[in-house]
Image (spheres, rainbow, N blue to C red):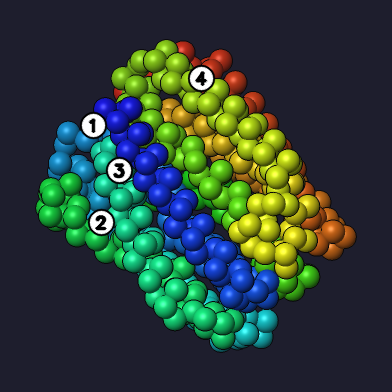
Amino acid sequence: MSAKKDAAALYVIQICNYVVPLLALPYLTRTLGPDRLGQIGFAQAFIQFFITVADFGFDLTAARKVSINRDDPVERSRLYWTVTLAKSTLAIACAGLIGLLIAFVPALREDRAVILIGLLSLAGTVLNPLWLYQGLERMPKMAVVSLGSRVVCLVPLFLFVRSSDQYLIAAATLFAPLLLSGLYLTAFAHRSGMVASWQRVTWSGIRVQTADAFQIFSGSALTFLYTYANTVVLKFVCGNVAVGYYVTADKLISPIRQLLWPLIQTMYPRVCKLYAEGRALQAEEIFRKITLVVVCFNAAAIVVVYLFGDRLILLFFGARFLPALPVLKVLIFLPLVLAIASVLMQLRLLAQGELRSLKRIYGIGAAFHVAQSIWLVMSLGALGTAISVVLTEIVVTALIWLECRGVSQRHALRKPALGIGDEPA
């Protein structure tokens, strides 16, 4: 499938993916209220940390290697089994740690049941071979399955969730889609020949893949401090209601934040291959075009929210959630900043194998966030959380841009790296 058709198919599916949450979220906010919605939002943030650990950066590093080795089924299968076993080991360790935390940390006992249900997503992240489909440019198939799993889970949501007492059922319908799609995508990958056969996994192979992915993971773990961890901090400082307002605003901007995801994900394996083949000028042209689209679209979204933000909240969530409006007006700047950072990081740094700088960049971002976020959260609650996140992301994006400038000055062209175990130059 051509890149244009690939991206077009993903956009059709992505639009459908927006419709599904828009059907469910207003129902959830009115049925559960800010308190129970905040409790589920806290559980999602809590589980997301362990999902980040289980992913360990494999989704990006392995996708690049699959793209480069797409015509070698033996190497592709060896990579699949190595990454899957590594992720499974990490997920089992995470599940054990979660069990210990909810058993011995008193502050988590109230949320024990919701967190345990969240283990469905942890299992799903192991089974979802996103990196395999992305590297082979089979993203439309994955997106269709993801959409289907969400639609299926809407049925029990509308049938059985009638009041805030059924919040556990609501949580299950939110955590289950990742597991359902993972089961299907894994089975399809084996049946279709994307994974040709079992290949023996060696400790040296696991070490090579883990060492490469660690550069991404270290950045992701530090990023967690100023993304999902904010919800956790907000809960303990201000309670579930404040979390509910923050989650409401975040859910409203989530479609905007994700709208450019198909474009970036479609072009990522292609740009990786262009850099590996020494065709840097073509890769840079793709980068410039995507950046222009990113800036124009997000600027329009900011204008819409400032003009009609209160009406959007009333339409989707009801009058009880109007206190989320100031939070929304701050968070609406986040998609623009994140989109620029994603384009720079994936299509410039990661596509060229430049991984080592990420830990330093995100370390600085995490330190900056810790320095200012606690005070802002304690002073302004959910609004302070939003301000601190946007400020930190601006700093991180600026650091990524500076690193890209340095890479451009050091490298005019990069040599092809065709082995899945190759270290970046």
Residue beneath disc 1 = 1
Q: CA distance from mark 3 to mark 4?
A: 24 Å
Residue beneath disc 3 = 140
Hey, what amino acid is under mark 3?
Pro
Hey, what amino acid is under mark 2?
Leu
Residue beneath disc 4 = 288
Regarding mark 1 in the picture, which secondary structure is present there?
A: loop
Q: Nearer the viewer, mark 1 or mark 4?
A: 1
The residue at the point 61 percent across, 59 percent down is 316
Residue toward you, 344 or 5: 5
343 to 374, vertically: above or below: above
Q: Position of residue 338 (x, y in %)?
A: 60, 39
352 to 108, vertically: above or below: above
Mark 1 or mark 3, earlier in chain: 1
Q: Residues within 10 Å of mark 3 (few under 14, many from 20)?
A: many
Regarding mark 2 in the picture, which secondary structure is present there?
A: helix
Hey, what amino acid is under mark 4?
Arg
Q: Quadrant of residue 263?
A: top left
The residue at the point 56 percent across, 54 percent down is 221
Q: CA distance from mark 2 to mark 3?
A: 12 Å
Regarding mark 3 in the picture, which secondary structure is present there?
A: helix
Labelled pair 1, 4 in contact (Cβ < 8 Å): no
Residue toward you, 341 or 327: 327
Labelled pair 1, 3 in contact (Cβ < 8 Å): yes
**Left or right relative to 187: residue 362:** right
Residue beneath disc 2 = 185
Q: Nearer the viewer, mark 1 or mark 2?
A: 1
